[in-house]
Image (tube, rainbow, N blue to C red):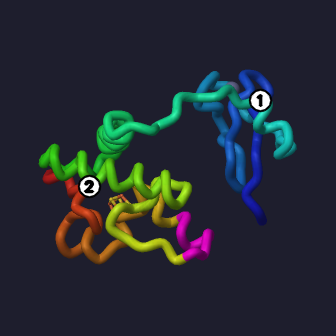
């Protein structure tokens, strides 16, 4: 099975994945997704604001941490800002917002796993030290 695009036939939400969502997260319609031709996707989607400044990157990280029950953003603002700068530099030089602390391999499939935020709960640093490799996200204390 291959991931593909799905379009909500009520509100034109686009979803990418093996299966469509049962409930459309935008309009709430049930079983509303039909497979979508990739050529249609670009036309159906509305352009959204680019995440191209440190402030915007940090805002995305804050929203991510706020909606995630297990992590929080590091409290050191200078450190967070530096990492946001690193992510944007990777965007400029290598095309995607790759992890500022790791080297891309040139193998796109592997490198896609390095887009920030990555799946850091799989890292040894997360299980042993309670933070992602760069210390950007930390385990929430309970
Ligand atoms: S290790 Fe941390 S900073 Fe690096 S990509 Fe993952 S979440 Fe982002
Ligand atoms: Zn919808």
In the rendered structure, find residue 44 and report the number of the disc placed on it. Answer: 1
Is residue 12 toward the left or the right of residue 122 in the image? right
The quarter of the image holding the N terminus is bottom right
**Figure label count:** 2
Q: Is residue 58 above or below residue 79?
A: above
For mark 2, give the secondary structure: strand
Q: Which residues are magenta?
A: 106-112
For mark 1, give the secondary structure: helix
CA distance separating discs 1 and 2: 34 Å
How far across and down, in percent of the image, does residue 93 sit? 49, 58
Q: Quadrant of ligand 2?
A: top right
Q: Which residue shows up at 37% across the image and 71% down it?
A: 102
| Residue carrying label 2 | 137
Q: Is residue 74 above or below residue 26?
A: below
How far across and down, in percent of the image, does residue 82 sit? 24, 51
Is residue 13 toward the left or the right of residue 126 in the image? right
Q: Is residue 90 magenta?
A: no
Query: What secondary structure is the stretch in magenta mostly built from?
Result: helix
Q: Is residue 33 above or below residue 26?
A: below
Say which label, 1 or 2, has the lower sequence index: 1
């Amino acid at each position: 099975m291959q991931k593909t695009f799905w379009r909500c036939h009520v509100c034109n939400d686009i979803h990418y994945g093996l299966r469509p969502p049962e409930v459309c997260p935008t309009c709430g319609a049930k079983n509303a997704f039909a497979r979508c031709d990739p050529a249609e996707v670009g036309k159906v989607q509305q352009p959204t604001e680019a995440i191209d400044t440190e402030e915007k990157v940090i805002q995305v990280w804050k929203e991510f941490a706020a909606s995630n029950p297990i992590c929080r953003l590091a409290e050191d603002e200078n450190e967070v800002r530096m990492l946001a700068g690193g992510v944007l530099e990777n965007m400029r030089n290598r095309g995607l917002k790759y992890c500022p602390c790791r080297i891309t391999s040139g193998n796109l499939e592997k490198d896609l796993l390095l887009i920030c935020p990555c799946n850091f709960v799989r890292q040894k640093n997360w299980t042993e030290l309670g933070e992602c490799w760069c210390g950007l996200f930390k385990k929430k204390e309970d």
